[in-house]
Amino acid sequence: MKVGVLALQGDVREHISSLITCGVDPVPVRRSAEIDAIDALVLPGGESTTIAQLSEVFGIYDQIRDRIAQGMPVYGSCAGMILLANEILDAKQGQKSFGGLDITVRRNAFGRQVDSFESDITFDYGSADLIRAVFIRAPWVERVGDGVQVLASVDKHPVAVRSQTMLATSFHPELTGDYRIHRYFIEEVARPALEKVK
């Protein structure tokens, strides 16, 4: 399985390091041929509007959107969650997303940079162990569509969701040294989806 990390802006190196620890050989991607060559994609935390704009500059916005729509496994953290959402509240004028995930997210829902925080949360992945979550100008989910499973919540707001081949978290597991979210994406989301295709 060839996993790409969208390398236009954001926590690219941290996601690559996390995936390597999970036994995957990830590649940074920013060009059309590189997008064609991958089986799954990680959308890193960063600035969602900048990532979307740069994907248009690099000529890969439509390609990524189409591959997600066709079922390519994808994981988005923080800005990545916003980029996967079908609807964005408090969006900048003209802000785009790749879409595909039937959720409504609110940008910067937990507050500004100074309101960033860490918390131990319950994540529904088959273990009772808590996961350390880092929230930095994080979104939360305000609407969950049919077929979308809530995996974690903070103050009754969903902060981790899954829908078939898509996983999204409003927090940054790539910053904690805890690789369980990345392992969950590889083993429970991406690998089963790719095996169905074969």
Image (cartoon, rainbow, N blue to C red):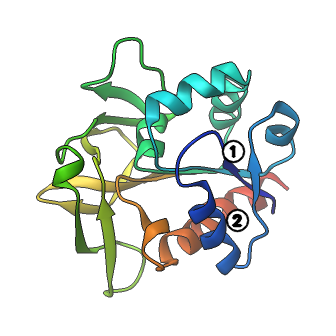
Q: Amino acid at mark 2?
A: Arg
Vertical comparison of 86 with 165: above or below: above
- Which of the two residues, 18 or 193, is positioned nearer the viewer here? 18
What's the mark number on residue 72? 1
Within 10 angstroms of label 1, few (less than 14), some, or many (20 or more) residues?
some
Q: Quadrant of the N terminus?
A: bottom right
Visible residue check, residue 99: no
User: Residue extending furthest left?
Assistant: 155
Secondary structure found at label 2: helix
* Number of other residues with Cα within 10 Å of mark 2, as a class: few under 14, some 14 to 19, many 20 or more: some
Task: For residue 141, say whether it is visible.
Answer: yes
Q: In the current view of this chain or complex, which residue is farthest to the top? A: 94
**Which numbered marker is on residue 87?**
none
Residue 142 image offset from top left, x and y in percent: 22, 39
Q: Circles 2 and 1: CB distance less than 8 Å?
A: no
Question: Residue 155: x and y, percent?
Answer: 11, 59
Tag 1, which secondary structure? loop
Q: Residue 46, relative to residue 32: is it above or below?
A: below
Decide if residue 174 is on the left or right side of residue 1.
Answer: left
| Quarter of the rendering occupied by the C terminus | bottom right
Q: Which label is found at residue 191?
A: 2
x, y percent for residue 85: 42, 34
- Position of residue 122 relative to residue 152, above or below, is below
Q: Residue at x 16, y 53 (%)?
A: 115
